[in-house]
Each structure stands twice: as C-alpha cells, then as structure tokens.
Image (cartoon, rainbow, N blue to C red):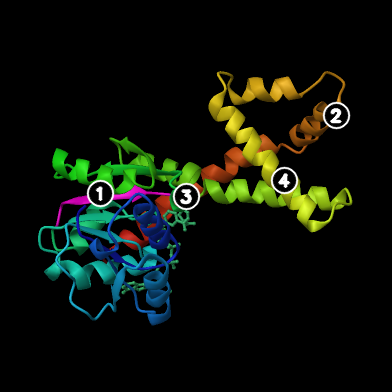
Amino acid sequence: MSKITFIGGGNMASAIIGGLISRGAAASDLHVIDPEAARLAELATRYGVTGGSPDDALPTSDVVVLAVKPQQLKAVSQHLAPSLGGALVISIAAGIRADSLSRWLGGHTRVVRVMPNTPALVQAGLSGAYAGADVDTSDRALADRVLGAIGEVVWVESEAEIDGITAISGSGPAYVFYFMEALQAAARAQGFNIDTARKLAYQTFYGAVKLALESEDDAGTLRAKVTSKGGTTERAINAFETSQLRATIIAAAAAAAARSRELGEELGRDAD
Ligand SMILES: NC(=O)C1=CN([C@@H]2O[C@H](COP(=O)(O)OP(=O)(O)OC[C@H]3O[C@@H](n4cnc5c(N)ncnc54)[C@H](OP(=O)(O)O)[C@@H]3O)[C@@H](O)[C@H]2O)C=CC1
Ligand SMILES: O=C(O)[C@@H]1CCC=N1
C-alpha cells in the first residue's frame, strides 16, 4: 500500500483510517498530523498509526488526505504547499473547489476532491470523487484504492455534482440517524423502555435496508407491500404525507447542497 498522510485526525480521518486498517493497510504506512496530542494518542492506540503536529515536517507521502474543516483548509494548504513533493492530494472538505485548493497549494494540480461519509468506518461508505483535468488515470486508480477500502466510489465528471453528493450521501447518514432517533422516541412514547425502544428502531432500519438492498423491488414497491389497504401503515404514511415529510426531505437536501456551494464561494475567495 502507498504511504498516506492525513492532515487532521478528527471524525472523518478516523473513519477512513479505520476502514483502511480493517482492509489490511499497514499502520506503518499511515501517518496523521493534528494539533491535539490526545487525539493522536487515541489514533495510535486504536490503529497503531504514527502522528505528529502541524509544525513537524511532512513525511514523504504518495497521498496526502486533507481532512481539516473547510474553514481551516486555506491556511493548512498554504502551509503544506512547499513540502508536498509529488503527492496526490485528496481533499474531503465540504464545499471547497479543486481550483481553489490548487491555487492554495501553489499550483499543485494533482488534486482529487472527494465527499466521503462516516459509514466508511464500517467499510460501507460512499465517496463521491471529482478529478481535475490534470489528474491522470494512475492517480485515479490510486484514489480508487484508498477510497475503495472504505466503501463504494462514484466518480463524477462535473464538479458541481459533488455538492449534490454532499447533500445526499455526505450529510445523509445524519438524516438516517435523525429518523432512527425519531423512531426510537416514538417507541418510548408507546411505553417501551430505552433498551427495547432502541432495539425496535435500529433492527427495523437494519432489516428494511437489508431487504431493500437484496430485493428486486424498489423502495416504493417495498413500502406498498407493507401498506395494507385500510391498515395501520396507511394511517402512518398518510400522516407523513399530510405533514409534507417527503417535500421537507427534498428541501432539506437542497439546503445542504446550497450550503456546499456557499462554502465554496465564501471560503474560496482569496481576498482575505
Ligand atoms: N463528518 C462527516 O460526516 C464528514 C465530513 N467531511 C469533511 O471532512 C472534513 C473533516 O471533518 P471532521 O472530521 O468531521 O472534522 P473534525 O473537526 O473532527 O476534524 C478536523 C481535525 O483537523 C484538526 N486540525 C485543525 N487544524 C489543523 C492543522 N493545521 N493541521 C492538522 N490538523 C488540524 C482539528 O483539530 P482541532 O479540533 O484542534 O482544530 C481536528 O482534529 C471537513 O472538511 C468536512 O467538511 C466530509 C464528509 C463527511
Ligand atoms: O456537515 C458537514 O458539513 C459535513 C459534510 C458532509 C457531512 N458532514
């Protein structure tokens, strides 16, 4: 496997590292740079990876994964620019466009913009990936190997699609967890204790997703098969429709995509 350095050792880096290690990557090939010594210590304990502070020299790397907050990316990139060498840069920051990043990296154009998601931790992630014009097929293959270790990869040819991917699969796990929380609260309202409520909600999600993935039927057909005419499900689905839940979900995802575009505009400017 290639030598990979993560800049930022937070939630997402940890998820990707966890996925890579579970897939057999050698911990000695993975290095993390983060200002928090405690976070580095936790990553070292959990995965055996080495770590360092942002003031340390960047180790020679085949791939540098930028996993800091979008707001931190400009300063971090400008700091790294002189020491990147020939590394392929993979940015997972929401919103930040490949051309902004290349500029901050002093004209480094081997840049892939990626939107992963946290199920990466259990190798069930989905990463949307966009390669700029100067990323060649061997760089794509290298990015595929890294991202493929944590789940599915969807390459897009237009960078604008990454904002849509951010809104659906990047932020999407939070929408699903939100629904799970709500279903658990509904179970509590039916009088079940917390443990049973959690089990009812989680196993229902797990079973429904497994069924959907393994079935020839689409989600709408599967829903119809649960919904007996004049029965209980129909009453619940009618309540969802009356409260315009479907339209709310579509509008919520559109708001997330708009925020991704807005982050790119706000943070991509070079005026400050
Ligand atoms: N969470 C998610 O589900 C997803 C997040 N993303 C994107 O991934 C990126 C990271 O998100 P997430 O992991 O949630 O964020 P976190 O805040 O958990 O992780 C960012 C880490 O970077 C550290 N950091 C700050 N400055 C530096 C520096 N100069 N050098 C090295 N490390 C630094 C932070 O330290 P400190 O806290 O001390 O500042 C923190 O540990 C974001 O850009 C986000 O848009 C993409 C897909 C999904
Ligand atoms: O909320 C965010 O901005 C990041 C990007 C997608 C998921 N988390």
State the extent of the magenta-drawn residues as a range: 108-117
Residue behind label 4 places its C-beta within 8 angstroms of ligand 1: no
The answer to whether residue 136 shows anywhere in this view is no
Q: Which residue is mark 2?
A: 232
Number of numbered tags placed on the structure image: 4
Which-is-in-front pick, marks 3 and 4? 3
Give the amino acid type for the residue marked by disc 1 in the picture: Val
Tell me if mark 2 has few (under 14), some (14-19) or many (20+) residues whose alpha carbon lies within 10 angstroms of its own.
few
Residue kind at label 4, given as amino acid type: Ala
Density class for disc 1 (Cα within 10 Å; few <14, some 14-19, many ≥20) is: many
Say whether marks 4 and 2 touch (CB < 8 Å). no
Q: Secondary structure at mark 2?
A: helix
Q: Residue 117 in the image: x percent, y percent?
A: 45, 50
Which residue lies under the disc numbered 1? 112
Q: Is residue 211 left or right of residue 167?
A: right
Instruction: Residue 158: tell me if it is visible.
Output: yes
- What is the number of the mark on residue 122? 3
Foreground disc of the pair 3, 2: 3
Residue 93 against residue 243 in the figure, above or below: below
Judge the density around disc 4: few (<14), some (14-19), many (≥20) Cα neighbours within 10 Å: some
Question: Which quadrant of the render holds ligand 1?
Answer: bottom left
Residue 77 or residue 63, whichever sits in front: 63
Q: CA distance from mark 1 to mark 3?
A: 23 Å
Q: CA distance from mark 3 to mark 4?
A: 20 Å
Q: Estimate the spatial distance between the alpha carbons at disc 4 and disc 2, rounded to whole Å.
A: 17 Å
Q: Verify whether residue 265 appears in magenta.
A: no
Is 97 left, or right, of 105 in this rendering?
Answer: right
CA distance for labels 2 and 1: 48 Å
